[in-house]
Amino acid sequence: MLKEIYITETNCITPLGFDVESNVEAILRGDSGIQLHNDISLMPNSFYASIIQEEKINSAFAKISTETKYSRLEKMMILALEPIIKNSGVELNAKTAFILSTTKGNVTALANDSDESFNNAHLDVLAKNVADFFGFQTQPIVVSNACVSGILAVSIAKRMIQSELYDNIFVVAGDEISEFVLSGFNAFQAMSELPCKPYSKNRTGVSLGEATAAVLVSAEAKNAKIKVIGDSSINDANHISGPSRTGEGLFRSIQNALKEAQIEANKLDYISAHGTATPYNDEMEAIALNRLGLQNVPVNSLKGFYGHTLGASGLLETVIAIESANQNMLFESKGFDEIGVSETVNVIEKNQQKNIEYFLKTASGFGGCNTAVVFEKIK
Amino acid sequence: MTQNKTNIQSYITIQNNEIVLNGTSVFKIEPTDFADFSKQAYRNFEMQYPKFFKMDALSKLAFLGSELLLSPITSEEKEHNIALVLANKSSSLDTDVKYQESISDKENYFPSPAVFVYTLPNICLGEISIRHQLKSENSFFIFDTFNTEFMSNYSNILLNTNKADMVLCGWVEYFNDNYKAFLCTISKEENTKYTNETINTLYNK
């Protein structure tokens, strides 16, 4: 019998707030972090994105450290981890691991042409800088699997605790807005001219965003916020930069995760989906959900609040979905107007009360990767 | 968790203009750059997969290694649950630097989607998955040096929880023409050939 696995602490740093509570309040008010920006150091033209104000990061960081050596992203990651490491009381010993998940890490360091700066663009260096701030004893594990990184990290943490290698694993996920990523999505013609509109008829692409999120994954049931009961991460084996038309990888990931969770698809009360608002991604998700008979389960994408935060998105959206479940409240899928995918999906149009026992989190990304994790509310 | 014995089935090392398969040198040429080495290796083994030429160097390196390990055991008729668990030090930095150059000079600004897509280390997992039609678990890790203990543990978890029947596990490092790939296949199937070996001992051979 495998150990039962829980998430016992959560936190997030986003344009909507620097803790979970303020983020949920902002979501309930209908606020979005996505704003119009004019910054030629990031993009030649104006663009919509969800960006955290520099001063907010610096003033929050000044309250916990006087060190000036950390990059902007490192500060955001440390800010996400700091309160949960403190609150948990977990000793950072040989049985406590640290997983850092990111898509591009400190890629902004590449814009500066020096050896020191280049060294900082390495993801293992980023992880070491964050780990050493807290004094982790174990070697950091970095997961970099495009846009599924954050949720894949939860599934990897679960598996490692179940195999009894560790008792506790702190997971942080983070990505920031950069000229590198903005220009790339723009070159792909994947950027929306207006704030993104997941699953909508008039969606034209992503709004990018930045955030960090952190959780503690543990075998300890005390103070548990949610139980992690099934997970899977299956590749489409179809295309490196576009999703499978049949949603095969996502379909199989969800199917496997439900099987491990030992629940039928009709037990799911809520789906926190990926919903990037690109035409192909949202269509693919609708097809995969229909193939599993999940078309009537309430679904949202939180991209309308946060933009697409790349590797951070899966973990950030899990943190918010846990609040959804514990407050028995479905949050609106911001930006949605008229259904714009070929198959039926039950997109949440307004905040509403609903009893949530089981929910599913999914993500998909470049390279054909998909991840699905099933969660169960603590009784 | 029930810990079943897992066994290394085959392994391959690519470095210094040479490919060594299960301890035997199968391809070696005079010192040259990776672009030339990889092209010659591709032709030598008659791989016939034109997409190879569109790949960045990291994907080419991972592709060459996986091709020689997986082609003998995969077929189009049958599905194979072979998980991919790869790691390196430099992520996709070799391509990241090239992409950064394409946007740094505003007078000469030419971001290309064909380059941008390779600024993710897990793209090489996608390339291998497409080639061998592996609809399977895949994850890419970054470490300062090859963390053989973690990679071996994680592969065993996938096998012991039946999330995979076989794991292609290894290290694929590429930056600025410096490269080393070490890949091995691991499964529960009996194999006495490498009983006294571990990923660590084979990697360091």
Image: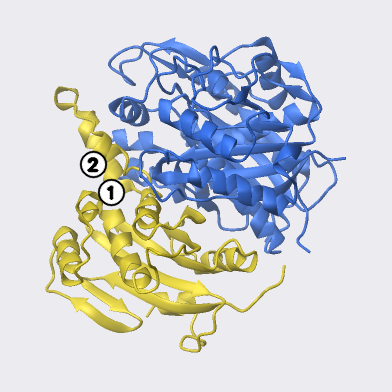
In the image, A44 versus A313, the foreground residue is A313
Residue A371: x %, y % from top left: 56, 45
Which amino acid, by three-letter code, is at mark 2? Answer: Lys
Residue B39, given in percent of the width and then of the height, sits at 16, 62
In the foreground, A172 or A272? A272
Coordinates of residue A70 in the picture (x, y in percent): 49, 36
Amino acid type of the residue that numbered disc 1 sits on in the rendered structure: Asp
| The quarter of the displayed image where residue B20 is located | bottom left
Extreme residue in the right direction: A379
Using the numbered discs, state the Cα–Cα distance from disc 1 to disc 2 in whole angstroms. Answer: 7 Å
Q: Is residue B112 above or below residue B87?
A: above
- Residue at 52% of width from left, 18% of height from top? A55
Residue at horizontal 68 percent and vertical 52 percent from the top = A259
The disc at residue A367 is: none
Q: Measuring 58% from the left and 36% from the top, which residue is drawn there?
A: A289
Q: What is chain B's hue in the picture?
A: yellow
Marks 1 & 2, CB-CB < 8 Å contact: yes
Would you say residue A147 is visible in this rendering?
A: no
Q: Tag 1, which chain? A: B
Number of residue marks: 2
Compared to residue A222, the image places residue A2 above or below, namely: below
Residue ID for mark 2: B98
Residue A108 in picture, x, y percent from top left: 37, 33
Pointer 1: what residue? B94
Crowding at dot 1, Cα within 10 Å, few <14 / some 14-19 / many 20+, comes out as many
Chain A pictured colour: blue
Q: Residue at x 54, y 35 (%)?
A: A312
Query: Is residue B114 visible to the viewer in this orientation of the structure?
Result: yes
Q: Is residue B91 left or right of residue A213?
A: left
Around disc 2, counting alpha carbons within 10 Å, would you say few (fewer than 14), some (14 to 19), or many (20 or more)?
some
The quadrant holding residue B104 is top left
